[in-house]
Image (spheres, grey):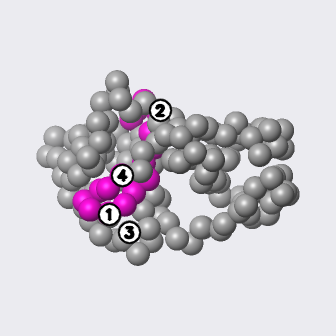
């Protein structure tokens, strides 16, 4: 599967705890030999693209309607996330391309660092999205400067 992903998609599948990007595709790996594949908006179905590229080398499950993504970035992003994530987000521990499955205010989330700005992407289940967004906004309250939540 790794060989076909690289040949057909131009995407090297990452090791656990890491994420890789090629064009509009992102592969996120939390456990060995399982990847969450994400794609920034295009007209072609991600499932169809993956099925065509990987064929019988992979089992595909469509999770597109189950999660909601949030991007947090800016000078206060690390401090805001540290208020409700039990992770060490210091640059020596969390770098661009690193992934963690964790809890945020008692809700399961998947987090990865996108760049050194710092920018973080988080996924939570759709059913918890409103609570997660509320917790994130409460953590972001900073009279001096807070992160940008989108």
**Picture coordinates of residue 51 (x, y %)?**
80, 60
Q: Which residue is mark 1?
A: 107
What residue is rendered at 61% in x and 51% in y?
A: 34
- Work out how far the residue at label 1 is from the one at label 4, CA to CA, in angstroms: 8 Å
Q: Are marks 2 and 3 in contact (CB under 8 Å)?
A: no
> Helix or strand or loop: what does disc 4 sit on?
strand
Within-10-Å neighbours for mark 3: few <14, some 14–19, many 20+: some
State the quadrant of the C terminus: bottom left
Q: Is residue 96 above or below residue 37?
A: above
Q: Nearer the viewer, residue 144 or 133?
A: 133
Q: Which residue is mark 4?
A: 102
Q: Is residue 17 above or below residue 122?
A: above
What residue is rendered at 82% in x and 43% in y?
A: 4
- Left or right for 77, reference 120: left
**Picture coordinates of residue 68 (x, y %)?**
47, 64
What label sits on residue 129 in the rendered view?
Answer: 3
Q: Are marks 2 and 4 in contact (CB under 8 Å)?
A: no
Within-10-Å neighbours for mark 1: few <14, some 14–19, many 20+: some
Task: From the image, give the main secondary structure of the stretch colored magenta.
Answer: strand
Q: Nearer the viewer, residue 81 or 92?
A: 92
| Quadrant in which residue 11 is drawn | top right
What label sits on residue 96 in the rendered view?
Answer: 2
Q: Earlier in the sequence, mark 1 or mark 3?
A: 1
**Picture coordinates of residue 56 (x, y %)?**
84, 58
- Work out how far the residue at label 1 is from the one at label 3, CA to CA, in angstroms: 9 Å
């Amino acid at each position: 599967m790794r060989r076909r992903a690289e040949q057909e998609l131009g995407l090297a599948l990452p090791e656990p705890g890491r994420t890789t990007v090629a064009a509009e595709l992102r592969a996120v790996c939390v456990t060995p030999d399982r990847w969450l594949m994400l794609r920034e908006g295009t007209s072609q179905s991600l499932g169809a693209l993956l099925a065509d590229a990987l064929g019988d080398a992979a089992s595909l499950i469509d999770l597109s309607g189950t999660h909601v993504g949030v991007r947090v970035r800016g000078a206060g992003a690390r401090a805001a996330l540290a208020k409700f994530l039990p992770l060490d987000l210091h640059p020596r521990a969390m770098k661009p391309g690193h992934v963690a499955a964790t809890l945020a205010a008692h809700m399961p989330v998947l987090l990865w660092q996108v760049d050194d700005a710092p920018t973080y992407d988080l996924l939570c289940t759709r059913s918890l999205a409103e609570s997660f967004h509320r917790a994130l906004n409460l953590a972001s309250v900073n009279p001096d400067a807070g992160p940008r939540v989108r």
